[in-house]
Amino acid sequence: MMPWILSALGLVVLLVAGDALVRGSVNLALRIGIPALIVSLTVVAFGTSAPELLISVSAVLDNAPGIALGNVVGSNIANILLVLGIPAMISALHTSQCDTRKGYLQMLGATLLFIALAWWGTLTWVSGLILLAALGAILFTMVREAQAHRANGEAEEPEGADPNMPGWRIAVYLVIGLIGLPWGAHLLVENATIIARSLGVSEAVIGLTLVAVGTSLPELATTVMAALRRQADVALGNVIGSNFFNLLGIIGLASLFGPIPTGPEFNFDLGAMLVAALLLIPFVMFRRDITRLWGVVLTALYLVYLVTVLV
């Protein structure tokens, strides 16, 4: 029972520390004069994915690379089937009113690139550099587009920005984030590995299920709120952005710390990740709404996937 409690504690620490790091980093960056545009596209993007990143790096360093790969692949599957499915059951997502085709094609391209590299056998530092180069290219196009929006007076304030936040509070947020993230990641990975051994399942399975669902909780909370506020573009954009950053940024960086094997045990999961990505075609490319019925279908497909992986 103790490893389960410590895993849950590690996850809570990760989520709290990740949010604190985003708030502290955003306000520090703005305080020292970094443009809000750059803060939005870099500090916020990397900060919100810090828990997944620290888990993957920690797993590689702790000689449990299966958790690192399982975390990312499982999170991407959960993001589409669960993170979009549950909110759609609560309140239909009117995705017909938003245009996320370019971001979706970038996510699909990232998925195909990742699968191609994974099928070679092991993700090495070379694979990591390729993935990071692809992420750099996407971020470059996003900066160009954001600059165009800003020129038209459409700039938005970064998430977590507070012009009146005192310096001592910024420092507290940064300390919580910088201490909490590595500690929470180590706690979760170490105890998830113990759980895997006690249950007689692989580290990959724990990464694909327990760790993946846990690290998808922030995206689920954000998407539920977006659905209730009828902000389908926020819900869909959140999932698309999270998925391509998981594949390119998190595994790209984690593979620089050590090789990540991608044996036959991941073939089914990589295929499931691709199928999940393709399921978004009607909603993104043909602008169909994700109705409550589709929400039920997506959620049911995720439950089927979980049963298949665990049995």
Image (cartoon, rainbow, N blue to C red):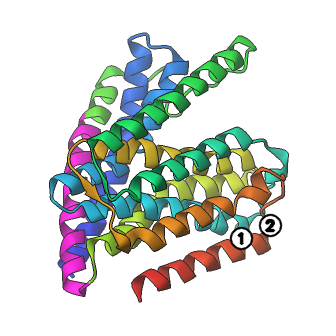
Residue occupying the point 44% across, 66% down: 213
As helix, strand or loop, the secondary structure at mark 2 comes to loop
**Which residue is rendered at x = 47% and y = 21% of the image?**
164
Amino acid under label 1?
Answer: Gly
Total count of labels: 2
Image quarter hosting the N terminus: bottom left
Residue occupying image coordinates x 53% and y 19%: 36
Residue 44 seen anywhere in this rendered image of the structure: no
| Mark 1 in CB contact with mark 2 (< 8 angstroms) | yes
Q: Is residue 286 above or below residue 44?
A: below
Q: Give the main secondary structure, helix, strand or loop, of the magenta stretch.
A: helix
In this image, 311 relative to 192: left or right? Answer: right
The residue carrying mark 2 is 291
- As drawn, 177 above or below 4: above
Residue 295, which numbered label? 1
Q: Amino acid at mark 2?
A: Thr
Magenta residues? Answer: 175-200
Q: Residue 240's x, y, as percent? A: 60, 48
Q: CA distance from mark 1 to mark 2?
A: 6 Å
Q: Is residue 200 left or right of residue 104?
A: left
In the image shown, does 170 or 47 lie closer to the viewer? 47
Q: Is residue 209 magenta?
A: no
Judge by depth and name the residue closer to the eye, 48 or 80.
80
